[in-house]
């Protein structure tokens, strides 16, 4: 037996935990994209997935800074806690923030709304594609995960978008080993999903392990809510109390952060990471099912939005 | 939970119950949520199905649900207190070989299902072959629907024997057999009381416990550089680190390492991880290496050990799976090839055969590969790749081909061996196994300075009688007279000694060229100008000599002595053409045996001696 074989035995215990493996794989993807693309950007909503993704990007290039700007697609219907958190994050890490404003496109008449308080989830696609085109981004990092939704389960890590920003799920590039193909022509771009293989529970466990700060609405707090179509909606300027219903003050938290008109809360007493993880581990409903009105319309709601260019 | 991560590729025929099995694993490990189950139940009912169709959980696309088939790889996740699992669920349809290959490429384990009533069928064999081809380290064959064969041990044993016999033909090292009923849950999560004769673990326990850490290659240190990290900040003005993922071996602080292609040797001064500095890094860690010496390193370079380097070569043989529906494999056209962190232009020089995945038959009379075809090809790249055989490393042995026009990923490939081509020495690999190079501590420049010379190889090729030897002798004479060490290597003379065991078959000619090439390279490395004068009729063989020189970083000048056949025949200094025309010898180059002129020689000259010598000397500068 050669010396090297013996050495192999000795290092046999060199193993990574599941979270460290996920971290390493995500960092590999982020570095690969930064090395191969000219003008990448990272979507940042202040939601937990984008917070995690940004954290991984910071680790990937340490001690250098994050080598690309972050892009917030702003529906105008925001939770104030989230905007405050976004600005604080930008300040703290010296990031460059770009904002793609749905409100502005409505003012310019490029997005038509039938009601000022309708969900702006779908309108985000227009604002996003507009920002991509205007700034010439060739790679757009998104925090989508395959466990979120079944159309996302079919998504690639590097996912091609044509010049109209559209996804063609039946014509995706095979993705083998870790040899990512990001080649594209001018005007086309690639969506990159570095945390594809993380589950909701993985995200929470990792955020807790790294003691990463999140917007406060992710933890249980008291809020004026009303139950509409099975969703627990916060009553505020974007979601006025529907006629004939009464609001109640309840202990709630958010599992996802989206447009304030379409994102529901869940009843919770989890005020810290530990209790959120315990709740997540025991949850019996997916995060989107529990909290997103827009994903419940049809079996293919997400697939249809993704085809149009959604995150 | 701080367990590891296990990637599983599943495969099975449409009715083998694969979806039911996955559904059960997800359900019993609480990875399916109530709203998902509700949605699936709703859809199943609306289609008039009695039972909940768990396939609907994984068939995520509209087209899949409409056609009731799985089209694309779907990823599913579940976890137990011991481990996190990622399932790449690949369709079992004939036309979707590419999905199976995709799913298997990253898998630690392949999970195959057979129907106990049907036993091993064509598709089982195909999936086993693909798992073997992709080198998935572990294979589990679940014999499903045991409830429908009265939980018969005999049926199970028959299937086990049949599959074992088939697997012997493959390169599958670890196979486990588990009798289950996915529908009723026998031996899925808990042991089945219906099969007391089965002494092994239930499937989930097996998946939780299987040891995968030692599947990694921890011997061959390989670090493809992804990007260079240079903060250039006030806080870190001089930080320069090389970011990448460790794909083989264990890198330690203080290790002597070599950077390819520059072959510069230095020491690892520090290893940074996402979570601080460490003393050692191993696969699949993403780290940043800092080096002692300030040397030029960039994306696509490979860091390894001086004593254990990957093969550096521009030619290799590989198995490929063709993925593209809109094009078929073409030889002699440029593709973009990605290998580790390197993109190069490549062409397929030859298609050796297509592999029939059902019979393992090799179809040699094949002109192209279409979507889902698997075949063996010879690849030529514009610059050297630093690779290992796929069987040694799934990372440094794999590549993808991309169509430069459509940007589609058209094929995935697995490297079998370096070099080799039609007119060559068969399957002889240029580097013997189990031999490592012992790099000299001296640099080439130091050696050359001591000898007072600058080494190089001048390779004169051309027909017999073209004037090669006359030119070679004159060049040698001029150089030595001017005080520069030079040595002529004449093909005919060497055939009396070094190559006395060789004849004139294509193989022997190629071997003759290889030997003279190696000797020339050694001479040049030592500071001598080696002047080889050899018919060397095959382009391939000469290109390999060139590649060997390039690898060693020694100048190589190919000189084509382009004298027309009629003139050679007229001169006929050795009387060979006369003998050939008289039928006394049959394989004289140019008469009975082909000569392939160089396509891009450094110099094309003629038999006009004075001018030829002047031109050759000009090459050396």
Image (cartoon, rainbow, N blue to C red):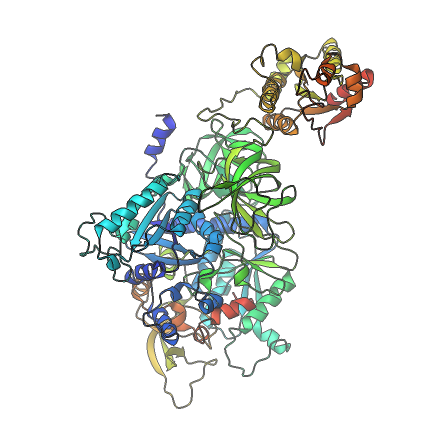
Residue displayed at 19% across by 56% down: B194
Percent of width and height locating residue B9 = 39, 52
Q: Residue furthest front?
A: B582
Q: Is residue A144 left or right of residue B313?
A: left
- Residue B344's place in the image compared with B582, above or below, is below
Q: Quadrant of the N terminus of chain A?
A: top left
Q: Percent position (x, y) of residue B448? A: 63, 17
Q: A112 or A55, which lies in front? A: A112
Query: In this view of the protein, which residue sits in the foreground, B314 or B342?
Result: B314
On the question of residue B464 being in view, the answer is yes
Instruction: From the top left corner, tell me how far across and down residue B594 is, in percent.
Output: 68, 26
Residue B317, by quadrant, is: top right
Q: State the image quarter where residue B487 is shown.
A: top right
x and y, in percent, of residue A163 in the image: 63, 62
Q: Is residue A144 above or below residue B584?
A: below
Is residue A220 in view from this perspective?
A: no
User: Is residue B454 depicted above or below A179 in this figure?
Assistant: above
Closer to the camera in the image, B590 or A119: B590
> For this rendering, which residue is in front, B375 or B217?
B375
Q: Residue at x 45, y 81 (%)?
A: A239
A1 relative position to B509: left or right? left
Give the total number of marks visible in the rendering.
0
Quadrant of res B531: top right
């Amino acid at each position: 037996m050669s010396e090297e074989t013996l050495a192999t035995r000795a290092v046999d215990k060199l193993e990574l935990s599941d979270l460290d493996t996920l971290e390493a794989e995500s960092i590999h993807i982020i570095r690969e994209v930064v090395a191969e693309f000219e003008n990448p950007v990272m979507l940042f909503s202040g939601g937990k997935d984008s917070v995690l993704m940004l954290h991984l990007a910071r680790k990937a290039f340490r001690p250098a800074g994050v080598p690309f700007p972050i892009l917030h697609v702003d529906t105008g219907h925001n939770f104030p806690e989230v905007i405050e958190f976004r600005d604080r994050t930008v300040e703290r890490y010296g990031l460059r923030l770009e904002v793609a404003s749905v409100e502005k496109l409505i003012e310019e008449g490029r997005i038509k709304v039938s009601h000022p308080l309708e969900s702006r989830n779908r309108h985000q696609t227009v604002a996003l594609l507009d920002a991509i085109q205007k700034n010439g981004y060739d790679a757009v990092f998104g925090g989508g995960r395959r466990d979120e939704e079944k159309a996302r389960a079919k998504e690639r890590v590097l996912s091609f978008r044509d010049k109209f920003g559209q996804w063609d799920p039946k014509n995706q590039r095979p993705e083998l080993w870790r040899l990512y193909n990001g080649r594209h022509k001018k005007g086309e771009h690639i969506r990159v999903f570095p945390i594809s293989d993380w589950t909701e529970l993985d995200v929470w466990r990792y955020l807790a392990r790294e003691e990463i700060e999140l917007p406060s609405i992710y933890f249980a707090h008291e809020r004026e809510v009303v139950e509409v179509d099975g969703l627990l909606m916060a009553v505020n300027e974007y979601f006025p109390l529907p006629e004939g219903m009464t609001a109640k003050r309840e202990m709630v938290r958010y599992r996802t952060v989206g447009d304030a008109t379409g994102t529901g809360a869940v009843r919770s007493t989890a005020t810290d990471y530990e209790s959120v993880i315990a709740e997540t581990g025991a949850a019996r409903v997916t995060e989107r099912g529990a909290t997103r009105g827009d994903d419940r319309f049809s079996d293919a709601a997400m697939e249809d939005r993704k085809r149009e260019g959604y995150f | 939970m701080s367990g590891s991560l296990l990637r599983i590729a599943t495969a099975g025929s449409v009715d083998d119950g694969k979806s039911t099995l996955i559904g059960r694993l997800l359900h019993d490990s609480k990875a399916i949520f109530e709203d998902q189950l509700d949605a699936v139940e709703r859809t199943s009912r609306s289609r008039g199905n009695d039972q909940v169709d768990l396939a609907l959980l994984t068939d995520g696309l509209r087209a899949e649900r409409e056609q009731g088939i799985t089209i694309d790889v779907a990823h599913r996740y579940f976890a137990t207190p011991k481990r996190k699992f990622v399932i790449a669920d690949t369709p079992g349809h004939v036309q979707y070989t590419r999905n199976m290959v995709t799913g298997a490429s990253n898998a630690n384990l392949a999970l195959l299902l057979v129907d106990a009533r049907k036993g091993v069928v064509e598709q089982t064999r195909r999936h086993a072959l693909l798992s073997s081809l992709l080198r998935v380290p572990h294979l589990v064959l679940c014999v499903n629907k045991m409830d429908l064969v009265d939980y018969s041990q005999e049926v199970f044993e028959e299937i086990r024997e049949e599959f074992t016999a088939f697997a012997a033909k493959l390169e599958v090292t670890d196979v486990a057999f588990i009798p289950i009923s996915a529908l009723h849950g026998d031996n899925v999560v808990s042991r089945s009381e219906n099969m007391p004769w089965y002494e092994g673990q239930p499937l989930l326990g097996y998946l939780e416990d299987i040891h995968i850490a030692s599947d990694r290659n921890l011997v061959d240190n390989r670090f493809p550089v992804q990007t260079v990290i240079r903060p250039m900040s006030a806080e870190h003005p001089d930080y320069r680190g090389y970011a990448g993922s460790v794909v083989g071996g264990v890198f330690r602080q203080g290790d002597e390492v070599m950077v390819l292609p520059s072959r510069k040797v230095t020491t690892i001064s520090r290893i940074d991880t996402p979570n601080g500095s460490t003393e050692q890094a191993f696969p699949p860690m993403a780290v940043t290496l800092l080096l002692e010496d300030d040397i030029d390193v960039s994306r696509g370079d490979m860091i390894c050990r001086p004593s254990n380097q990957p093969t550096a070569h521009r030619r290799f043989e590989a198995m490929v799976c063709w993925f593209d529906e809109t094009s078929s494999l073409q030889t002699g056209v440029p593709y973009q090839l990605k290998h580790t962190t390197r993109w190069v232009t490549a062409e397929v020089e030859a298609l050796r055969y297509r592999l029939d995945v059902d019979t393992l038959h090799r179809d040699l009379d094949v002109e192209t590969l279409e979507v889902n075809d698997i075949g063996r090809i010879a690849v030529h790249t514009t610059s050297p790749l630093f690779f290992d055989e796929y069987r040694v490393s799934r990372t440094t042995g794999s590549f993808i081909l991309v169509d430069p026009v459509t940007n589609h990923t058209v094929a995935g490939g697995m490297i079998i061996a370096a070099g080799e081509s039609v007119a060559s020495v068969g399957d002889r690999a240029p580097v013997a196994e189990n031999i490592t190079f012992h790099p000299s501590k001296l640099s080439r420049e130091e050696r050359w300075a001591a000898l007072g010379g600058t080494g190089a190889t001048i390779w004169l090729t051309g027909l017999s009688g073209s004037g090669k030897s006359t030119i070679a002798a004159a060049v040698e004479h001029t150089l030595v007279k001017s005080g520069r060490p030079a040595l002529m290597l004449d093909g005919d003379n060497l055939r009396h000694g070094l190559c006395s065991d060789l004849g004139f078959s294509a193989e022997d000619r190629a071997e003759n060229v290889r030997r003279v090439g190696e000797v020339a390279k050694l001479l040049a490395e030592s500071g001598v100008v080696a002047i080889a004068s050899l018919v060397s009729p095959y382009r391939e063989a000469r290109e390999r000599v060139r590649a060997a020189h390039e690898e060693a970083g020694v100048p190589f000048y190919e000189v084509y002595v382009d004298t027309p056949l009629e003139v050679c025949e007229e001169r006929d200094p050795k009387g060979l053409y006369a003998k050939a025309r008289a039928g006394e010898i049959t394989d004289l180059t140019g008469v009975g045996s082909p000569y392939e002129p160089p396509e891009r020689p450094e110099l094309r000259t003629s038999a006009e001696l004075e001018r030829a010598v002047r031109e050759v000397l000009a090459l050396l500068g």
